[in-house]
Amino acid sequence: MSDRVRNIAILGSTGSIGRSTLDVVAASHERLCVVGLTANSRLARLCDQARQFQPNWIVASNPDHASAFDWSVMPAGTELLLGAEGIASLVSRPEVEIVVAAIVGSAGLTGTWAALEAGKTVALANKETLVMAGPQVMRLARERGGKILPVDSEHSAVFQALEAGRRQDVKRIILTASGGPFRRHTPAQLAQVTVDEALSHPTWDMGPKITVDSATMMNKALEIIEARWLFDLQPDQIEVVVHPQSIVHSLVEFLDGSVLAQLSPPDMKLPIQYALTYPERWDCPSPKLDLAAAMSLDFEPPDLDRFPAIGLGHEVARVGGTAGAVLNAANEAAVAKFLGGQLLFTEIVPACRSVLDHHHFDASPTLEKLIELDIWARQEVTRWVCT
């Protein structure tokens, strides 16, 4: 095991992934060092984290929140940076080796892009980056010598299983889904789902947006698209299976029929740590799997009629171009409308379907075009809700 200290910056340190990353750092026996932290609105928590980990820089990404905050609580020796420019400045610093991209939603794209442009290793928890701009992001990483290591538990599992064989020998990958809290609901029951019910996930502790995505299974749609670009697969090589226990995080089937899986209790600290320490493996603060305890591992196909988001994911993975950016933005907006009481649970995916069908498709968009369509799709969801 290397004794070399690895310097990391965490984009979105006050969120679920960011806090779990700091747990990993705290347990690393000073082999991981935080040099930068960023947050949007939870600035008091950001300063608490800064006092504990003593980073060189913190970034308040929202200048309006920053201007209203009392920065006297910031520790001495830590420099404050502001806005998107502050994030870009942070990730390009020579002191930063690994950037943990943990900002939820499309807002995470610009920081990830800046890190790859600077040739950094990115521990990617923000699946929306590859959903929106998969080909462009992967090309940028190749051109600038950057590296993307997955943090999503499903993609980390695939990444680990792929270490056992050659890429050209892969037949397919199988992403597992918990099925969320509504996998047995009838259509009538789904139409009555409340916000509180949707935010009650049976196995994972996540933020509101990701929890709702799990309930609609839109998270699997986004993961299908992410896997298509991250692992350079054809869409028909990516399948989804429902696994309620969330112990098997994904599987890889090779041409000879061998199927390799990665198993662990549902806790994000393990995939986070593997991305930070790759190719090494260290003792991890996450719970360990007790194979001496009685357990069952169940698998079943997803109900595509009850959860049509998965079909959208395969469709967008096939067509590429601007479709991913539009689907992602429409979903973010629709979930926000549901959480705000303006949209039914069963209307989230149809709203995304409608916006996707009505956008002007471009097979080879620029980054500027993708950002433009991100804004347009959000506006379209608002119009969809109001009609």
Image (tube, grey):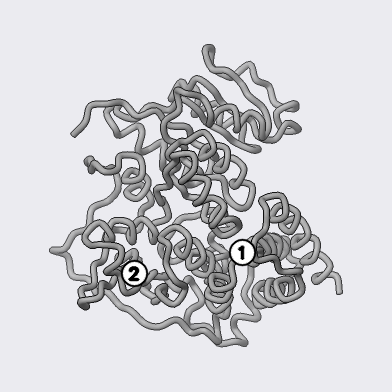
Secondary structure beneath dot 1 equals helix
In contact (CB < 8 Å): disc 2 and disc 1: no
For the residue pair 301 and 84, the one nearer the viewer reads as 84
Single out the residue that lies furthest toward the right. 387
**Image height check: is 206 above or below 186?**
above
Give amino acid for label 2: Gln
- The secondary element bearing badge 2 is classed as loop
In which quadrant of the rendered view does residue 237 lie? bottom left
Look at 42% across and 70% down and name the residue there: 177
- Residue most extreme to the top: 76
Look at the image and tell me in which quarter the C terminus lies.
bottom right
Which circle marks residue 324 in the picture?
1
Place of residue 138 in the rendered image (x, y in percent of width and height, measured from the top left): 49, 51
User: Which quarter of the figure is the N terminus placed in?
Assistant: top left
**Residue at 49% of width from left, 55% of height from top?**
206
Name the residue type under label 1. Gly
In the rendered image, which residue does mark 2 sit on? Answer: 245
Is 200 situated above or below 40?
below
Residue nearer the viewer, 299 or 105 = 105
- Farthest left residue in view: 292
Which mark is on residue 288? none
Question: Where is residue 31 shown, x and y percent of the image?
Answer: 29, 28
Left or right placement of residue 63 versus residue 200 in this view:
right
Relative to residue 173, is residue 192 drawn left or right?
right
Q: Distance between the residues labelled 2 and 1?
A: 29 Å
6 horizontally vs 223: left or right: left
Residue 311, horizontal then vertical, whole percent: 55, 79
| In the depicted structure, whether residue 56 falls above or below residue 14 | above
